């Protein structure tokens, strides 16, 4: 079985990374990760896009520059990485989604410009707001917008499983098919203790159709890499054991958070004598799942 192995790229290829962009590319190329999620895309009150703190698309024009475009293209052409997503939102930034709705024509133009400029395959929704009915409607609307532009859409929940399930049901009801490709379920920090199999069961037992034939394959759990010597996060050996519990369950993917912590701790001995390169974490997930 070919597993979908993902990683969130915290400021990947742009920003205050501890290592140069070309070294990031070298470490990521052929690492074993099949999906890279660039974190995080934010939306201002005019509908313009910001990659972390740096303008990305303004007034329908891509403005970040050619180096980022080239690095993303090289990442996909180097082999292994099949899917590139931009993750929208983060903790404390639920206004990103409301700003899209408030400026829908401008935001749509900016999505089109980003899609034309960067080889992106889709978008991931890291909504962490107050989970209102209106916000649920916003998520559904933006899901349909991006799907209409030919983009993949994934959701990245950490809580409120029934609220997210409501999004899936509404998307299916509106379109007679499911436009969402999967959950990237956070199982760390606020999502510590989340059971991906329980989230999958909730989908399978939905009182209304979701258009998801295999709920277990729809849910991909994610865990934090080791980032401090105090024991926070997981070293590759621990992550392999963590994913081994899902072997044979029907879960066929997983991911880790995040590249920034991996790059910061290269060659620091944080996990003893074990290596902590991106490939070590990708292989941990693959081996844990039984690959």
Image (cartoon, grey):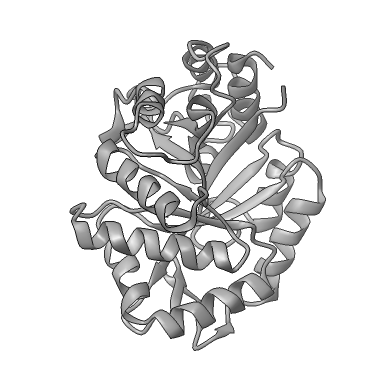
31 left or right, relative to 108: right
Residue 174 locus on image (x, y percent):
42, 58
**268 or 121, which is in the foreground?**
121
**114 or 164, which is in the foreground?**
164
Residue beneath the point at 57% across and 11% down: 248
**208 or 123, which is in the foreground?**
208
Residue beneath the point at 60% across and 47% down: 36
Say which quadrant the N terminus sits in: top right
Is any part of residue 164 visible from this angle? yes
Residue 51 locus on image (x, y percent):
48, 67
Say which quadrant the C terminus sits in: top right
Residue 54 locus on image (x, y percent):
47, 73
User: How many numbered marks are there?
Assistant: 0
Q: Residue furthest bottom?
A: 59
Residue beneath the point at 54% across and 23% down: 251
13 left or right, relative to 99: right
Residue 108 locus on image (x, y percent):
49, 78
**173 or 219, which is in the foreground?**
173
Residue beneath the point at 49% across and 22% down: 235
Task: Please tell me whether residue 267 is drawn above or below residue 119 in the rendered image.
Answer: above
Residue 195 figure quarter? top left
């Amino acid at each position: 079985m070919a597993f979908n192995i993902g990683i969130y790229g915290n400021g990947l290829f742009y920003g205050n990374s501890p290592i140069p962009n070309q070294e990031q590319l070298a470490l990521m190329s052929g690492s074993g990760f099949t999906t890279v999620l660039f974190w995080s895309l934010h939306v201002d009150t005019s509908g313009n896009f910001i990659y972390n703190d740096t303008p990305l698309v303004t007034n329908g024009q891509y403005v970040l520059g050619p180096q980022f475009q080239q690095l993303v293209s090289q990442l996909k052409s180097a082999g292994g990485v099949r899917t590139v997503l931009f993750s929208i939102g983060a903790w404390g930034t639920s206004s990103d989604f409301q700003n899209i709705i408030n400026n829908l024509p401008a935001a749509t133009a900016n999505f089109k410009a980003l899609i034309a400029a960067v080889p992106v395959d889709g978008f991931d929704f890291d909504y962490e707001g107050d989970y209102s009915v209106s916000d649920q409607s916003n998520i559904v609307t933006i899901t349909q917008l991006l799907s209409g532009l030919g983009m993949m859409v994934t959701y990245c929940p950490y809580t409120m499983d029934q609220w997210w399930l409501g999004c899936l049901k509404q998307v299916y009801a509106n379109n007679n098919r499911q436009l969402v490709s999967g959950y990237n379920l956070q199982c760390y920090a606020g999502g510590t203790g989340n059971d991906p199999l329980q989230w999958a069961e909730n989908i399978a037992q939905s009182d209304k159709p979701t258009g998801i034939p295999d709920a277990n394959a729809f849910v991909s759990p994610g865990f934090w890499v080791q980032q401090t010597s105090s024991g926070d996060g997981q070293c590759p050996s621990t992550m392999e054991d963590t994913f081994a519990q899902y072997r044979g369950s029907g879960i066929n993917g997983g991911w880790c958070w995040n590249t920034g912590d991996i790059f910061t701790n290269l060659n620091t001995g944080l996990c003893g004598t074990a290596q902590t390169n991106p490939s070590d974490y990708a292989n941990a997930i693959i081996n844990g799942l039984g690959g």
